[in-house]
Amino acid sequence: MLRTITKVVLFTVGIIAIISNVAFGQQANEQTFEIIESANDSIDLRSNFYDVTDSLSDYFPANELYESWDNDGIYYPKVDFSTKTDTTIIVLCDNKTNFYAQPVKGRINSEYGFRHRRFHYGIDLDLDVGDSVKCAFDGMVRVSRYHKGYGNVIVVRHFNGLETVYGHLSGSRVHENQLVKAGQLLGYGGSTGRSTGPHLHYEIRYLGTPMNPHKVVDFDKFKLLKDTLYVTSKTFEKKNTKPTYSKTTSTVKTSTSGTTAYKSTSNYHYVKKGDTLGAIAGRYGTSVSSICKLNGLTAKSILQIGQKVRVR
């Protein structure tokens, strides 16, 4: 009898223990699932994801300014600075921990501002296919992919709070989420996407809002205007602060229309819509006969858009 009672008691205790373990296991699994789910849902937000992973928020550049890290979108949602009344100070270069490198040392083919009834949010720098394109500041590659407009494009978010965009590349040498330094090779010049000839489309943005690169860089000397950028509402005015280049003379001067003229130092010209041999010769300070002789053409030759023409 005693043995039977003992067996019943032990059996009952065993059942209770099993039920308790199952309940505890279910609770533990539910808690684990909730954490994983929270991490996945918050991967683009500075909220629970950063709390769970501790120092991950410090991993992304300028995390105190930006609310997301997105490898797909070329554009970060623009901030409206029209009512900005204060001044934000951005240290661009101190030659100790912050440095600058000119992405491409080429003449400007197209300026920031309205162009063909559309707004051009960057500047186009002249280059040849295969030329090295370098990173402007230290940062991390946010986007490196193909876009129908930008072609092969790289977007870098920098530790100083800016983002730079490098478009129409022929190829990339970096990958997304890769840390990069000022002057590091990002890719090579090309004419991919919506482009009529090789050039680098270069943008500078702050919190998703483009600014005229001339407010940051002296493109005649290929260096920063100042080591510190003072950001106000006027920084984002949508107007040209630098006239469009018309490469027709060998000296720099301002015409009555307010345009600045430069003689090109390039050896080649890529034919754009509307180009003629006479117009090309005028832009580069040469003659039609000279261009024909260099390229095996005649004065009646038909030019094709994108055709590479040697001019000297």
Image (cartoon, grey):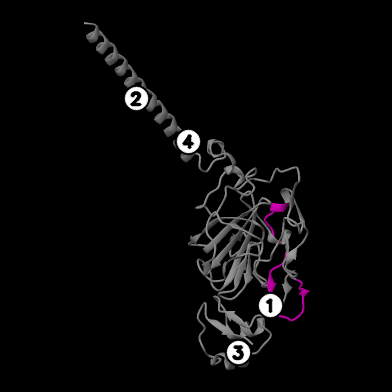
> Is residue 52 inside the magenta stretch?
no
Query: What residue did someone put label 1 on?
Result: 247
Closer-to-camera residue (4/232)? 4
**Is any part of residue 241 visible from this angle?**
no
Residue type, mark 4 in image: Ser
Name the N-terminal-most of marks 1 and 3.
1
Instruction: Report, in whole angstroms, how far the alpha carbon at label 4 lies from the one at label 1.
Output: 57 Å
Residue 106 at x, y = what percent? 66, 72
The residue at the point 78 percent across, 75 percent down is 253
Quarter of the image containing the N terminus? top left
> Is residue 248 inside the magenta stretch?
yes
Is there a contact, CB below 8 Å, between mark 1 and mark 2? no
Name the N-terminal-most of marks 2 and 3.
2
In the image, which disc is placed on residue 291? 3
Closer-to-camera residue (137/169)? 137
Residue type, mark 1 in image: Lys
Name the N-terminal-most of marks 1 and 2.
2
Nearer to us of marks 1 and 2 is 2
Instruction: Report, in whole angstroms, how far the alpha carbon at label 2 lies from the one at label 3.
Output: 86 Å
Residue type, mark 3 in image: Ile
Would you say the magenta stretch is mainly helix, strand or loop? loop
Instruction: Report, in whole angstroms, how far the alpha carbon at label 3 lies from the one at label 4.
Output: 65 Å
Q: Secondary structure at mark 3?
A: helix
Q: Quadrant of residue 131?
A: bottom right
Query: What residue did someone put label 2 on?
Result: 22
In the image, which disc is placed on residue 38? 4
Quarter of the image containing the C terminus? bottom right
Q: Which residues are magenta?
A: 235-256
Specify few, some or many for label 2: CA neighbours under 10 Å numbering under 14, 14-19, or 20 or more: few
